[in-house]
Amino acid sequence: AQSVTQLGSHVSVSEGALVLLRCNYSSSVPPYLFWYVQYPNQGLQLLLKYTSAATLVKGINGFEAEFKKSETSFHLTKPSAHMSDAAEYFCAVKPQSTGNQFYFGTGTSLTVIP
Amino acid sequence: EAQVTQNPRYLITVTGKKLTVTCSQNMNHEYMSWYRQDPGLGLRQIYYSMNVEVTDKGDVPEGYKVSRKEKRNFPLILESPSPNQTSLYFCASRRPGANQPQHFGDGTRLSIL
């Protein structure tokens, strides 16, 4: 089975600082990759997805992620953190095989310090 | 408005009392899934469905049942709930296609005493 590793269960940044949330996957064949955000008491919302068209993917709210095959990584970044970015972030992987199986990382809770 | 609706949002019940969590989507999506979210474990897939009457096990199916009699509905059934099934549950739906993202409901917080 796939595994998804998110390094750092809690990340704190100052408002205006760079946000970097890490995600690594385990398969030798690049899967489809997604980042989701979860605000308190809500479901998950899609931030962005990698679909092999371009290695740098732009998402909503100023977030972007870069796919690096050699590092099996898909790290999420935002140049300048805003207070409203405080939330839980999940990296998710869908293997290239058909079907509907998805694998999620354990999540990273982002705190933004004013 | 496109949405995935789960009911109930919160439920406290006792061990062994059968319960059903309903999930309905209005986007005509073929694929649907159930997940449980536990602290430190992220989301784990319980069951998924790729069409009416087509369901398959995810990573943690033990103690759960599902059915898909209609395209829009995908209920999660706990025949004999136990305390280790206390969790936050999410239903999700999506279109076919490996790169299609999932749309999530707002979650059901289940406590089993």
Image (cartoon, coloured by chain):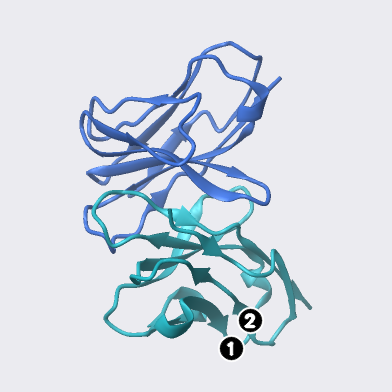
Upstream in sequence: badge 1 or badge 2: 2
- The x and y percentages for residue B76 are 43, 27
- Residue at the right extreme of this rendering: A114
- Amino acid type, callout 2: Val
> What chain does badge 1 belong to?
A
Q: Is residue A85 above or below residue B53?
A: below
Question: Which residue is more in the foreground, A24 or B49?
Answer: A24
Q: Is residue B23 above or below residue A103?
A: above
Chain B colour is blue
Marker disc for residue B23: none
- Can you identify the residue that label 1 sits on? A79
- The x and y percentages for residue A35 are 47, 67
> What chain does badge 2 belong to?
A
Quarter occupied by the C terminus of chain B: top right
The chain painted cyan is A
- The x and y percentages for residue A114 are 79, 78
Could you confirm whether marks 1 and 2 are on the same chain? yes
Residue A35 lies left or right of residue B16; in this view the side is left
Helix, strand or loop at mark 2: strand
Give the image quarter of residue B99.
Answer: bottom left
- Can you identify the residue that label 2 sits on? A19
Residue A99 lies left or right of residue B13; in this view the side is left
**Label 1 vs label 2: CA separation?**
6 Å
